[in-house]
Amino acid sequence: MSESHRSVFTIPNIRWFLLFRLLFNARFYYPVFTVIFLDYGLTLPQFTILNAVWAVTIVLAEVPSGAMADIFGRRNLMVLAGILMVLEMGIIALAPVGQGALVFFLFLINRVCSGLAEASASGADEALAYDTLKDSGQEDEWPKVLERLGRMMAVGLFLAMIIGAFVYDPQWVGAALNFLGLDVSLTRNDVIRLPILLTLLSSFGVLYCAWRMREAKSFQKTPFSFEQLRHSFVRVFDAGGWILEHRFVLSVILAGMILDSVARQFVTLGSEYFRFIGIPIGFFGPIWAGMGLLGWLYAKWARMAVEHLSPLFNLYLLAVILLTALAGASAVIPIYGLAFVVPVDAMMLFVGFLQSHYVNREVDSARRATVLSFQGLALNIGYGLTSIYHSVVILGIKRGLPPEAAADSGYVLSVSLLWLPFLLIVLLGALLWLGRCCLKNSEVIHRAG
């Protein structure tokens, strides 16, 4: 069978790309993310500061790393991401528990390494995989690769959430050990590092996958020099100018930023929403894991959407679904309000799938990683701005409530949810007006595939 007609999943780069993404994103500490930071001895304000450092690191490094990947090699940036992930997890695996300033300093290094790893991987892995397909004349198979990735990620996230929550519960771990004949009694300090150690183990898998990948044949790497380093930043502005000139790509990036940021803002607060609508805390982990497993179905539906529906229709469809879900969630229906969380959580997968397809289809290989980094940058900026907006809304609501009601974080959240559909309507209205002015003569927004 010729290379141009063989299954894309027999191509080594595609297989390693899928495994790289799976191991990089399915982390065992996710179901106890906030709790594990606090159990190490950090305060809630310190936790907030560390997340801000993480976001700022990504924003500052996202686009330059994409430009450097386009010059120095996508594989090299992926290897760097693997090394940084090993450092990221290794630092907190060795961090002492309860030693205030030292713990904060080590977690600060962890957040910087994590942000740099995210930025290094973002764009580089996708650009390398897509160009590999393009070299063999199979770039039209990219939606199938994304579908397979979505299914693998769904299973990986499900397992990571279940296992991570399980090993962080000393009673469950103790029961399992007792079942094996070991008579032990465990405390939280005995299991605090288990999710971290499991993720550290998977980080070595990430590094191995990156090492096994090879640059696409069409990619022309240039020798390192300070002139090339300077040129990498010049390419950032070049890619930014290209996006502004290609208004369809700009519209795809902005649409994704709007939909993802509003959906992500709600999902981030999902655990508090669950509590307020009366779902027992013990069910939080299985619920998130179950929603992650639904990604198996979403991946197929997303592929069908890009193959059979136009970009404009897909925007309308996702907007209606998200608005309906947010409106339903804002009604705060006990227990049954969970049904509205599912489509909001799914929105992020659909947005990522559609953005990847449309942007990769339009951009040329020479600037692919840089443009994809702009896409990732837009998502992080959008989420940050939406978080600021929602924080201001919450502060305003609390000031207008009696002290007893203002102290109930669940109630304040429920009132603030009404402002998220409002924000979405305003932003989408502005985007559609901009699109009407800039893209009214473009056929690409009406073409499926």
Image (cartoon, rainbow, N blue to C red):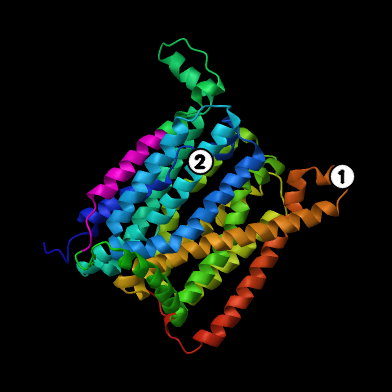
Quadrant for residue 442, please give it: bottom left
Query: 229 or 90: which is nearer to us?
Result: 229
- Residue 214 drawn in magenta: yes
The amino acid type, in three-letter code, at marker 2 is Tyr
Q: From the viewer's perspective, is residue 234 above or below residue 443?
A: above
- Magenta span of residues: 198-216
Seen from this angle, which residue lies furthest front?
226
Q: Quadrant of the N terminus?
A: bottom left
Query: 246 or 219: which is nearer to us?
Result: 219
Q: Main secondary structure of the magenta part?
A: helix
Seen from this angle, which residue lies furthest bottom?
441
Quadrant for residue 36, please give it: top right
Q: Tell me whether circle 1 and circle 2 mark residues in contact (CB < 8 Å).
A: no
| Residue 348 on image: x %, y % | 51, 58
| Residue 257 on image: x %, y % | 54, 66
Q: Which mark is residue 403?
A: 1
The amino acid type, in three-letter code, at marker 1 is Pro
| CA–CA distance in space, label 1 to label 2 | 33 Å
At label 1, counting other C-alpha atoms closer than 10 Å, the crowd grade (few under 14, some 14-19, many 20 or more) is few
* 144 sits left or right of 264 in the view: left
Circle nearer the N terminus (1, 2):
2
- Does dot 1 land on a helix, a strand or a loop? helix
